[in-house]
Image (cartoon, grey):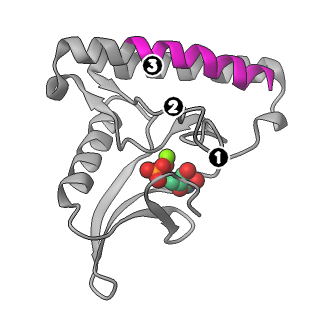
Amino acid sequence: MSTGANNVVIALNETEVAKIYEGDTRSDIGSEAEKMKFANGVNKLVVRFVRIDFDEEKQWEMLVMERLYAMDYRSIEFEKRELIFSVFEDEIAALHRAGFAHRDLARPSNMPGERYDNVLLTGSGLRLIDVGISALRHQVGDSLFERFIEQETEELARFKDFFLNR
Ligand SMILES: Nc1ncnc2c1ncn2[C@@H]1O[C@H](COP(=O)(O)OP(=O)(O)O)[C@@H](O)[C@H]1O
Ligand SMILES: [Mg+2]
């Protein structure tokens, strides 16, 4: 089911997906899981972490998480989208205040694929996946974190335009 840039993501069942880490990426999967759990402790915006698993047969590690079902923005009327966006904005702000910056709302414009593929519209509003390059204030320090927040706030404004007007 993956259209991501780096990792393969497979559906395990109706409610769970797993992001596959092949080779010696223990630190990557551990760090991604930690960041996901941190954000889960703040609010429901970031996809919920379930567990880390190891597939003996295939010899790969898996980050198991809640499975999200994305809907097309165009199926939602404008007024409702405005409401959904304002909730999203509040939840991102709460993550920022808590010391979490997602940093990957949009992929670089020179990269192929859906620009906002880490922001999913679901039946319960907008949700974020892929905390691979997310940053925690206590890990990166105040000055870098503030810069990430500035960049994310600008990106959020571009996403707003896209989400409301496409
Ligand atoms: N929790 C999830 N529920 C449903 N689909 C997901 C989930 N996580 C990832 N995906 C799908 O897999 C793709 C790649 O996952 P992602 O975490 O963004 O990895 P990458 O680092 O490769 O971008 C996503 O663009 C999305 O299509
Ligand atoms: Mg991604």
Of the residues under marks 2 and 1, which one precedes in the sequence? Answer: 2
- Residue 145 on image: x %, y %: 26, 18
The magenta stretch spans residue 26: no
Q: Which mark is residue 152?
A: 3
Quadrant of the frame with the N terminus: bottom right
Q: Is residue 161 above or below residue 100?
A: above
Of the residues under marks 2 and 3, which one precedes in the sequence? Answer: 2
User: Which amino acid type is marked by label 2?
Assistant: Leu
Prevailing secondary structure of the magenta residues: helix
Question: Who is closer to the viewer here, 33 or 141?
Answer: 141
- Residue 82 on image: x %, y %: 71, 17
Which residue lies under the disc numbered 2?
105
Q: Is residue 60 above or below residue 6?
A: below
Select label 3 or label 1 by which is in front: 1
Q: CA distance from mark 3 to mark 1?
A: 20 Å
Residue at image x 27%, y 49%?
33
Q: Which residues make up the magenta segment?
A: 150-166
Of the residues under marks 3 and 1, which one precedes in the sequence? Answer: 1
Q: Quadrant of residue 94?
A: top left
Residue at image x 32%, y 42%?
36
User: Which amino acid type is marked by label 3?
Assistant: Glu
Q: Which mark is residue 113?
A: 1
Callout 2 touching callout 3 (CB < 8 Å): yes
